[in-house]
Structures are given as C-alpha cells and as structure tokens.
Amino acid sequence: MSGHDGGRLDPVAWSRPVIGVLGGLGPAATAVFLDVLIRATVAGSDQEHLDLLVSQHSTTPDRTAGILVPGAPDPGPVIARDAVMLERAGVQLLVLPCNTAHHYARQVEAATTIPLLSIVETTARVAVAEAGGTPVAVFATEGNIHARVYQEAIEAAGGTALVPAHSLQEDINRLIYEQVKAGAPVDLELFDSCIDRALEQGAGIVVLGCTELSVAYDQHGYRGDARLVDSLTELARITVRRAGKELT
C-alpha cells in the first residue's frame, strides 16, 4: 500500500507526530473535532496541517452504560485495542474526543507506550482558571458524573466542581441522547435554560464535558460564549500545541 510499509506509516511520507484519533464515541463529535482541529491550526496549505489516523469505531459499547449498568458490555478493552492498532500503525500521540471514555484511559495507557492527551485534564485546567475561584458546573453524561471524571480533575486543578441538580441533569441527558446522538434538532432554548440554571446554582463557568454538547456549541453559535468552556475545543488546542504547530 502506498505510504505504508508492512502496515506501518512510512516516515518519509508522513510528518511527525502523526496523531491517532480514537473516534466514533460518538461519530458526530469526532467529525466536529476534526473540523475544529483544522480550524485551530495555522496552515497556508494542505501540507501544513497535521497528519492523522482516525479510528471511527462507532460500535464501541456505550460508555455510560459500561459505568452504570451491571453486566453491560465493557468499552474499555475495545478502546484499548483500537489504541494498540493505531500505535502499531505508527502514530506517536493519541487523542480521545470523548469525555466519559476517559474513565477507561488507564486501560489505554496500560496497553500502549505512546502518550494519550487528556480532554478532561486540559479542559478542567482552563475552566478553573476562567472561573476565578467560583464553582465550575459540569455538563456531562450521568456515567461521567457518577465516575467523578470531571469532579476529580477540577479538584486536582484547584477548583470546585458543581454537579447539576437532578432536574437539570435530566435536561442535559435529553440534549445529549435524545437530540445530538439521535440526530434530532437541538432545542436551543433548553440548552440556554440549562446554562442559566447552572449559573443560578452558583457556577461561574460551565464546562461542556460531553462532546455531544460540543457539537451543539460549535454548530449553533455558542463559540466565544464567555459562560462556557468547551472540551472538544480545548482538546483540539492542546493537540495542535503538542504537535508543534501554531494556533490560530
């Protein structure tokens, strides 16, 4: 195969580092991540953009079910095997554009020898800095909340996490599962209401800690909203920096 040698990338034909994207979790979020990554990179030609290998493994078992439902299929080994596949192909850096899946990051790190950038840690650091001492509200899946993925990262960054009240979490679930993941229109009034209610509960900043919410953020005019820190955007930015490229 042109550009390959025994299934591995030809170092002459591919720039370094090649980024391995553990995608499909969900599919729309990965597509938006690639678009945001391209827009975040200073490049005057095709050849100045990052080289990527993308695993769009949409049939990976549900991450929230894996955390919350006893006996549900475990996505961890699936994600780890995909990481090994990308490493064997020759990528030097992994990214995982799914927040809840970072509950399984240790399995990926145990299976590979290359770095995995954390969408959670980089987003938490930015959010704590932006919050200026006020609580950071976490908009994420119930699995993410239950596993304390963002709460621990925010606390490690020196901040205080605010977990949405039950009624607010139910509305966040609707946005994630019944709208973005289902390919249905996003109820922007509901989205705005969720943000307002989190701020009323005392948050200074809202983290969009689910990449389905990042899809709504990117496609419906929320980019630049000072109330929000978007995880997919922060992952794209750290990816560009770690690859040695300049941010737009």
Image (cartoon, rainbow, N blue to C red):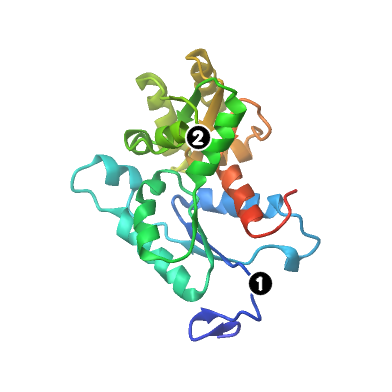
Q: Is residue 134 above or below residue 187?
A: above
Hey, what amino acid is under mark 1? Ser
Residue occupying image coordinates x 64% and y 48%: 237
Residue occupying image coordinates x 45% and y 50%: 26
Q: Is residue 40 above or below residue 204?
A: below
Query: Which corner quadrant holds the N terminus?
Result: bottom right
Instruction: Give the residue at mark 2.
Output: 157
Q: Is residue 113 left or right of residue 75?
A: right
Q: Which image quarter: residue 153?
A: top left
Callout 2 secondary element: loop
Q: Is residue 186 left or right of residue 66?
A: right
Q: Which image quarter: residue 122?
A: top right
Q: Earlier in the sequence, mark 2 or mark 1?
A: 1
Residue occupying image coordinates x 52% and y 74%: 90
Q: Do callouts 2 and 1 mark residues in contact (Cβ within 8 Å)?
A: no
Instruction: Give the residue at mark 1.
Output: 15
Hey, what amino acid is under mark 2? Ala
Query: Which residue ends up furthest to the left in the rendered image?
Result: 71
Q: Which image quarter: residue 161?
A: top left
Estimate the x, y position of residue 148 in percent, counting from the top left.
36, 35
Query: Which residue ends up furthest to the right in the rendered image?
Result: 44
Estimate the x, y position of residue 43 in percent, counting from the top left.
77, 59
Q: Determine if residue 66 is in view.
A: yes
Q: Is residue 87 above or below residue 146?
A: below
Which one is in front, 175 or 244? 244
Residue occupying image coordinates x 53% and y 69%: 91
Estimate the x, y position of residue 240 in percent, counting from the top left.
65, 54
